[in-house]
Image (cartoon, rainbow, N blue to C red):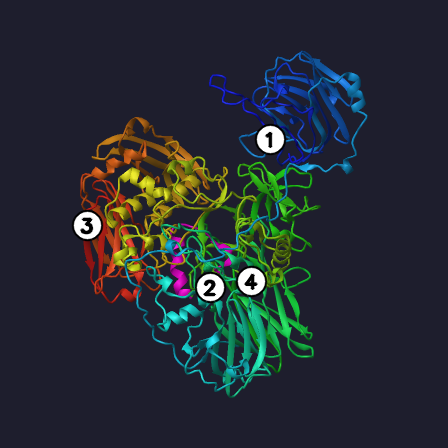
């Protein structure tokens, strides 16, 4: 309690030891208090420590407790109010309520109770005295009871509104205000108590301390290095820098490539120059015919560094330490992009606009010698009318001066000596940009800070009226999903000075509606809705095709075409996709009386309100038992957006729901899709398939770094929910954006641009914290007024969520018991990539032993996983041995992360997201995938643990569980458990018939493994079979009692696994060639972590991406397993070589001839 003033605690002198100095005398205070507190029923209490040597704690001490109390109308009728000592164990002195009556409690079952209930309204004076023998209890100055308690010494603690631990939140907690709570060291007389009872303090003059404090403002920040790090701390290399290799230049002529009607991309022919090398004026540069013969052919879309690498100026920064051969000056200078293009394709259109879909960081745009204006921020489109400046039948010169973020910072450079350093720096001041490009513990600094035209440039042509950013709102009257209402909000922009009459039409999948409208100068927004006021009954759908996240159904999409036509002008046409779905959220929120309520929140049902129904301002987010919770907006307790939830086991954590169904959110963060923002659809799509195939269903768009159309399109198609951040980083760590209006302008454009994507499940203001109030309030308003169908959470952690982490090695069993119980948005551990990865990304001279190349690629030898790996398997003497050991660790650890989530599904586990699923460059730290589509053991462990039907062993309890995240219960299934010694001897067999509930974890039986472990390792094999005998899930664990027990695996006999491979004639995945491999363990011992690799025969390179139905497979003696492999179809014309290795597996191979 902040108002508390006490003497410093003293430790009693140990009299058995020689006294080296005299102990300072203890001088007690005359009293403790007064303390004033405002406590919420659903919130937390206040605590203060007392000096441990104070005589007032003794059982014979005289004392008086007193307080003024005002009860909340919803306060529990039996609850502790305030007092001294440990409130829930041992002896204590506490005011309490017992069935609504005031009481004095001494602990150990001793209490005295007032004669009548304490009135709810108004202030009441409670007092208790003790003279060393007898205690007396008073209410409003009148003695209610007395007793002679048998009490011992109390703990040195004071509490207002103590919160007990309880099996299920929310726990019973006092609600109301407490004024002038005081503990004095004398026993006041009855007359003195009566006087005090008539001295009620004025509550308006009291500053009450909040038990549930609001979210704090940022008080400290890190803004990066003030000087470069010492040269001795820079990474050292054995290999020389690579020589740059130029790519073939793009075509020299710019062409207009048609997209949808009225929309063209300016393709090819772009040139790039460093601004300091160009002395010409903007007017000259943007004049047709300007000489660019000394300029570089530019890669557009792309960053300036991408162009320079493509033209052979610099090496690939992803390889080894080659990024150090690229200068920092690239982030401290401007650049000119230029293209000349013909305009014949748009000549007949009245209104022509230039659209920049994404630049970084600032662009000054010029056309034909004239300035068009400026756009700032990586996530802000630039839209400029060029109708009057366009040479419609001649050449047009477009010149764009690009400036990098104004605060590029001085980045850390990772090495073994330095370590990973700190994250980010000065660039956080710039807000909406690629913050990770300054350098993070998983991403090196990009020396241009991803400056450039990172998205494409379009021409858009219409008549006088064009169509703006439409909004498609789909609404289900849950729980009914058989009907849907579609509302279309369509902004029409009128560039002329006259009203324009025309027909507004919208059509999708057999639905077609038309409306005659008059568009005023400047424009207006028109609504097409199925409501009585809208009158378009066709927009009410019966039995709609619903969009579902991965694992819950098909992600169905509709295709909307909107047109505006007039009798004389060219039509305006826009196309988009949308999904019919309703998102809602189970949350624990503080209601207007301060009680913590578990509710189902559907923002769509309150979309028309002036403000959102959930208060996530700094004042609205409060500390509660278990963390933090948002509040219900004042006056909104009865809003139709809320429905009570009877199952409170997940309190206080967020639960995501789609179409009324709870989603067990399992996925991971994408920190940055690519370090140089090479984000074409064909580059991103393999990652989405990997995520889908791993049974994941959510991607966090960390810091909004991946906000581009192809990202959201692919998420829609693959059924991946998107948790969408904006661009601020950790509270009390990183700097806050210095231009709130620029930040909010980028946010506005982002929401309007991407809000129709069904994959976006929610908006999030900041990574690990809350934006400063001016930005947070702005985002609250924007997400509600521009969207209104999704929840906005200011923070990615703590508020109805868990804190972030852990990020390093933890005991696997702890994931099943204590780690991250609730909704964890960031959790991770080390995940070394594959052996093949090293040959692609590190030079041979620096691959082994661990070198600064490893550290620069984010792997540091002091990692906790290294320590435990050495304890389990011994010191590795080669890269091959080290990688094999690491893959064993990868499999166990990542399976445990998600099986631990499964073990407590909904009680309280509701979401678990990895940090991270894949890195933005060849990082060795956290990803379950590599940046070049390779997949290590952690990926296949994740895929195994996230099966919709899954059998698992709880490593904390040795209980066997069935996890069913489908919507269908499992009836008459059979679970088998077999425990083997490493020599193949069967030690234990257990089988049971079981019915497993849908959307739940079901306990099957317990395995008594302790007597079998000793100082060695056993193998535990689990199998789940359907009633017809079909294998539904299987799982194999190697188990030991300690790290040292796993050393027995070193002596495991070699296993011979044969592989038979063939080409399948058809694949259900477009653009792929499918191989089928039969693995057969012909040995008498188990084959652990059997790894398949697919290589091209002509050069021995690994075929990537390669989608294996399973890998890192463990096979019992005699066991067979069939694996399918999808590889790109462009490999169909050549033979491929399949190679096999494993922990104790004899290497083998097989060829598959070309088709």
Q: CA distance from mark 4 to mark 1?
A: 42 Å
Of 600 and 874, the residue lying toward us:
874
Q: CA distance from mark 3 to mark 2?
A: 44 Å
- Residue at far front of view: 21
Residue 175, compared with residue 658, is above or below; it is above
Earlier sequence position, callout 4 versus callout 2: 2
Q: Which mark is residue 163?
A: 1
The magenta segment = 680-706
Earlier sequence position, callout 3 versus callout 4: 4
Badge 3, how many Cα within 10 Å: few under 14, some, many 20+?
some
Q: Which residue is mark 2?
A: 449
Q: Is residue 448 left or right of residue 976?
A: right
Q: Secondary structure at mark 1?
A: loop
Residue 56, compared with residue 1054, is above or below; it is above
- The quadrant of the picture occupied by the C terminus is bottom left
Q: Is residue 273 left or right of residue 1105?
A: right
- The quadrant of the picture occupied by the N terminus is top right
Q: Nearer the viewer, mark 3 or mark 1?
A: 1
Residue 444, compared with residue 26, is above or below; it is below
Q: CA distance from mark 3 to mark 4?
A: 51 Å
Q: Which mark is residue 185?
A: none
What residue do we see at 47% from left, 82% from top? 340
What residue do we see at 40% from left, 43% from top? 808
Q: Which residue is mark 4?
A: 750
Q: Nearer the viewer, mark 3 or mark 2?
A: 2
Badge 1, how many Cα within 10 Å: few under 14, some, many 20+?
many
């Amino acid at each position: 309690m902040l108002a508390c003033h006490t003497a410093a605690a003293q430790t009693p002198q140990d009299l058995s030891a020689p006294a080296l100095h005299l102990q300072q005398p203890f001088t007690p205070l005359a009293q403790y208090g007064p303390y004033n507190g405002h406590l919420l029923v659903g919130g937390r209490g206040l605590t203060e420590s007392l000096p441990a040597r104070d005589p007032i704690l003794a059982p014979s001490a005289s004392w008086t407790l007193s307080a003024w109390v005002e009860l909340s109308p919803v306060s529990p009728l039996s609850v502790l109010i305030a007092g001294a000592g440990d409130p829930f164990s041992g002896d204590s002195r506490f005011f309490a309520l017992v069935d609504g009556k005031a009481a004095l409690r001494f602990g150990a079952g001793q209490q005295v109770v007032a004669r009548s209930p304490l009135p709810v309204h108004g202030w009441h004076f409670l007092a208790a005295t003790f003279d060393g023998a007898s205690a007396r209890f008073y209410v409003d100055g009148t003695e209610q009871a007395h007793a002679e308690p048998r009490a011992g010494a109390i703990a040195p603690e004071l509490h207002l509104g103590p919160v007990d631990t309880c099996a299920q939140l929310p726990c019973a907690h006092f609600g109301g205000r407490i004024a002038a709570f005081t503990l004095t060291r004398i026993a006041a007389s009855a007359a003195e108590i009566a006087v005090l009872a008539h001295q009620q303090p004025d509550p308006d003059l009291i500053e009450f301390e909040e038990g549930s404090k609001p979210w704090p403002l940022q008080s400290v920040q890190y803004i990066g290095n003030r000087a470069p790090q010492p040269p001795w701390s820079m990474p050292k290399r054995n290999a020389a820098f690579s020589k740059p290799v130029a790519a073939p230049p793009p075509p020299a002529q710019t062409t207009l490539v048609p997209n949808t009607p009225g929309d063209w991309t300016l393709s090819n022919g772009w040139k790039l120059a460093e601004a300091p090398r160009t002395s010409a004026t903007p007017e000259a540069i943007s004049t047709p015919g300007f000489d660019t013969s000394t300029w570089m052919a530019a890669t557009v879309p792309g960053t300036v560094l991408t162009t320079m690498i493509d033209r052979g100026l610099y090496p690939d920064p992803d390889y080894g330490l080659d990024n150090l051969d690229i200068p920092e000056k690239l982030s401290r200078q401007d650049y000119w992009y230029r293209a000349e293009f013909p305009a014949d394709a748009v000549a007949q259109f009245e209104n022509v606009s230039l659209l920049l879909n994404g630049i970084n960081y600032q662009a000054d745009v010029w056309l034909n010698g004239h300035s068009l204006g400026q756009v700032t921020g990586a996530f802000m489109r630039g839209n400029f009318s060029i109708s009057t400046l366009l040479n419609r039948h001649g050449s047009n010169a477009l010149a764009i001066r690009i400036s990098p973020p104004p605060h590029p910072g001085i980045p850390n450079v990772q090495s073994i000596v330095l370590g990973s350093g700190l994250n980010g720096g000065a660039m956080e001041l710039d807000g909406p940009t690629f913050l990770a490009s300054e350098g993070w513990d998983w991403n090196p600094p990009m020396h241009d800070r991803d400056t450039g035209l990172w998205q494409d440039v379009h021409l858009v042509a219409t008549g006088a009226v064009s169509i703006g950013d439409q909004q498609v709102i789909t609404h289900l009257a849950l729980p009914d999903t058989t009907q849907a209402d579609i509302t279309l909000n369509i902004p029409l922009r009128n560039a002329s000075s006259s009203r324009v009459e025309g027909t507004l039409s919208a059509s999708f999948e057999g639905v077609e509606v038309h409306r005659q409208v008059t568009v005023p100068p400047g424009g207006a927004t028109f609504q097409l809705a199925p409501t009585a006021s809208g009158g378009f009954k066709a927009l009410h759908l019966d039995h709609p095709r619903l969009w579902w996240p991965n694992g819950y159904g098909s992600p169905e999409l509709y295709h909307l075409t909107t047109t505006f036509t007039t009798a004389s002008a060219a039509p305006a046409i826009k196309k988009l996709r949308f999904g019919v779905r309703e998102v809602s959220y189970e949350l624990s929120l503080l209601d207007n009386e301060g009680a913590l309520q578990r509710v189902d929140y559907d923002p769509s049902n309150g979309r028309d309100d002036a403000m959102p129904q959930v208060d996530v301002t700094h004042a609205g987010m409060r500390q509660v038992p278990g963390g933090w919770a948002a509040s219900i907006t004042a006056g909104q307790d009865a809003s139709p957006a809320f429905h009570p939830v009877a199952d409170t086991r997940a309190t206080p954590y967020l639960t995501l729901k789609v179409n009324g169904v709870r989603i067990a959110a399992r996925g991971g963060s994408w920190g940055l899709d690519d370090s140089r923002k090479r984000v074409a659809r064909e580059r991103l799509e393999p990652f989405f398939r990997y995520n889908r195939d791993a049974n994941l269903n959510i991607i966090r768009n960390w810091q909004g770094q991946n906000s581009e159309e192809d990202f959201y399109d692919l998420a829609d198609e693959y059924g991946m929910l998107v948790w969408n951040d904006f661009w601020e980083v950790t509270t009390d760590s990183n700097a806050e954006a210095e231009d709130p209006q620029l930040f909010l302008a980028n946010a506005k454009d982002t929401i309007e641009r991407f809000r129709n994507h069904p994959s976006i499940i929610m908006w999030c203001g900041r990574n690990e914290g809350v934006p400063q109030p001016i930005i947070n309030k702005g985002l609250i308003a924007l997400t509600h007024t521009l969207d209104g169908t999704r929840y906005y959470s200011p923070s990615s952690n703590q508020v109805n969520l868990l804190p972030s982490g852990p990020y390093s090695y933890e005991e696997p069993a702890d994931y099943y018991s204590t780690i991250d119980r609730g909704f964890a948005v960031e959790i991770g551990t080390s995940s070394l990539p594959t052996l093949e990865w090293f040959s692609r990304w590190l030079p041979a001279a620096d691959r082994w032993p661990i070198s600064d190349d490893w550290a620069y690629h984010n792997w540091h030898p002091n990692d906790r996983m290294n320590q435990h790996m050495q304890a389990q398997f011994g010191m590795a003497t080669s890269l091959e041995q080290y990688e094999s050991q690491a893959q064993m660790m990868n499999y166990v650890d990542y399976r445990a992360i998600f099986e631990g989530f499964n073990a407590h599904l909904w009680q309280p586990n509701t979401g678990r997201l990895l940090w991270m699923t894949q890195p933005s460059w060849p990082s060795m730290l956290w990803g379950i995938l590599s940046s070049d589509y390779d997949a290590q053991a952690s990926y296949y462990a994740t895929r195994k643990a996230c099966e919709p039907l899954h059998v698992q062993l709880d490593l904390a309890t040795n209980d066997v569980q069935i996890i069913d995240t489908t919507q269908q219960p499992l009836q008459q299934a059979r679970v088998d458990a077999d425990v083997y010694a490493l020599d193949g001897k069967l030690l234990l067999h257990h089988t049971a018939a079981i019915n497993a509930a849908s959307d739940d974890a079901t306990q099957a039986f317990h395995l008594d493994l302790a007597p079998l472990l000793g100082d060695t390792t056993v193998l535990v094999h689990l199998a789940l079979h359907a009633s017809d005998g079909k294998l539904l899930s299987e799982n194999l664990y190697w188990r030991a009692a300690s790290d040292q027990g796993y050393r027995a695996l070193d002596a495991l006999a070699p296993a011979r696994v044969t592989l038979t491979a063939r080409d399948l004639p058809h694949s259900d995945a477009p653009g792929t060639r499918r191989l089928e491999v039969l693995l057969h363990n012909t040995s008498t011992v188990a084959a652990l972590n059997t790894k398949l690799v697919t290589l091209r025969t002509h050069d021995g390179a690994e075929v990537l991406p390669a989608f294996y139905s399973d890998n890192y497979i463990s096979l019992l003696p005699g066991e067979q397993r069939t694996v399918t492999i999808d590889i790109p179809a462009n490999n169909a014309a050549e033979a491929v070589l399949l190679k096999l290795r494993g922990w104790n597996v004899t290497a083998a191979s097989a060829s598959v001839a070309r088709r």
